[in-house]
Image: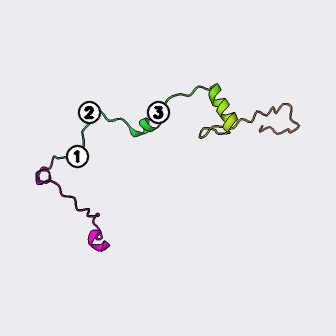
Amino acid sequence: QSTRREPLGKSYVRGHDIHPEYQSNPDFRYGVQTCLSESAKNLMYPEVPQPKDDPAHKLYIRSHGDYQPGEQRDRGYDWTKSTVKNPHH
């Protein structure tokens, strides 16, 4: 039965009937054309600069331990008081 509905090399036949007027018109398109097109990337990831010292974000990190993607974790170590003498810290 699936070979009848989905023959190799063709898409699935759902049985929808399209009005003959639309089938004969090569300029027919579904939907509404927009005058301007905005990038989907800008809609999903707007370029809004985040403040560096946001007190609400710092409180959220402290309460939930949740960081933004790519945000470096700052555990508040004071390396000057440490006995570890590693130049990478």
User: Dots 2 and 1: beta carbons under 8 Å?
Assistant: no
Q: Main secondary structure of the magenta part?
A: loop
Indicate which disc, 2 or 3, sits on the residue closer to the N terminus. Answer: 2
Residue 72 locus on image (x, y percent): 66, 37
Foreground: disc 2 or disc 1? 1
Residue 53 seen in this snapshot: no
In this picture, residue 41 sits left or right of residue 12: right
Residue density around tag 1, few if under 14, some if 14–19, many if 20 or more, within 10 Å:
few
* Residue 45, x across and y down, in percent: 47, 36
What residue would you read off at disc 2? 35
Which secondary structure, mark 2?
loop
Q: Nearer the viewer, residue 89 or 46?
A: 46
Residue at point 82%, 39% (across, down): 86
- Sequence-wise, the earlier of marks 2 and 1 is 1
Q: Which residues are magenta?
A: 1-27
Q: Residue at x 11, y 54 (%)?
A: 20
Quarter in which the N terminus is drawn? bottom left
Res. 56 in view: yes
Task: Specify which label sits upstream in the sequence, 3 or 1.
Answer: 1
Q: Mark 2 and mark 3: span between their CA atoms?
A: 21 Å
Q: Amino acid at mark 2?
A: Cys
Element under disc 3: loop
The residue beneath circle 1 is 30
Label 2: few (<14), some (14–19) or many (≥20) C-alpha neighbours in 10 Å: few
Distance, label 2 to label 1, CA atoms, is 16 Å
Q: Residue at x 18, y 58 (%)?
A: 17
Residue 23 vertical position relative to residue 2 in the rendered view, above or below? above
Helix or strand or loop: what does disc 1 sit on? loop
Name the residue that disc number 3 marks: 46
